[in-house]
Image: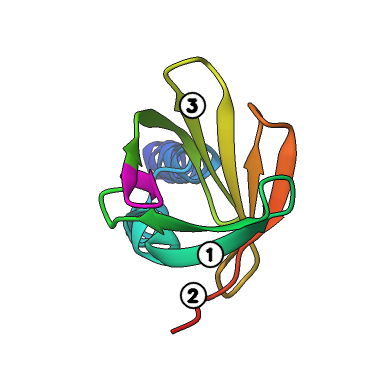
Amino acid sequence: MKKRGMLLFGAGLAAGLTSTFGIGRSKKKHATSLPIFYAGTWEYYDIERNRTHYLEITPELKLSIDKHEISANVELIDEHHLIYIDKFGYHITIQANEQRPITLVDEADDQTYTLTSPKK
């Protein structure tokens, strides 16, 4: 009976540790859908340049603005943020709500832009 109790304790401890450290199916499944959540094309208006720009994020998380690919690496991706770091060390942050990406924060220009669906 003592061995059985130790085995149950060990199994419970292992289960608790794996859930604490985020090891499980649900996190992996959710993490693979995040690139699709952020993928798409949006526009934003730059008031300083009096110009509308087009932002595109591919399912592979490649970033382009006005059809020019931006050389940047993904630093973080979660349900509310997609953060790139460009070749100069500046952050480009895409913030999202529950439905879609809603803002672009450009650290290099110290600007925040509202993302909208492109007008046809």
- Residue at point 38%, 37% (across, down): 3
Q: What segment is highlighted magenta in the picture?
A: 62-68
| N-terminal label among 3 and 1 | 1
Pointer 1 residue: 43
Cβ–Cβ under 8 Å for marks 2 and 3: no
Cβ–Cβ under 8 Å for marks 1 and 2: yes
| N-terminal label among 1 and 2 | 1
What numbered label is drawn on residue 118?
A: 2
Residue 18 on image: x %, y %: 44, 40
- Give the quarter of the image for residue 114: bottom right
- Indicate the secondary structure of the residue bearing disc 1: strand
- Give the quarter of the image for residue 23: top left
Residue 37 on image: x %, y %: 42, 65
Task: Name the quadrant of the N terminus.
Answer: top left
- How far apart marks 3 and 1 lie (CA) works out to 20 Å
| Residue type (three-letter) at the residue carrying disc 1 | Glu
Q: Tell me if I can see residue 77 in this picture.
A: yes
Task: Name the quadrant of the C terminus.
Answer: bottom left
| Residue type (three-letter) at the residue carrying disc 2 | Pro
Residue 111 on image: x %, y %: 73, 40
- Residue at point 41%, 66% (across, down): 41
Residue 63 in the magenta stretch? The answer is: yes
What numbered label is drawn on residue 98?
A: none
What numbered label is drawn on residue 85?
A: 3
For label 1, the crowd category at 10 Å Cα-Cα, with few meaning under 14, some 14 to 19 and many 20 or more, is: some
| N-terminal label among 2 and 3 | 3
Q: Tell me if I can see residue 13 in this picture.
A: no
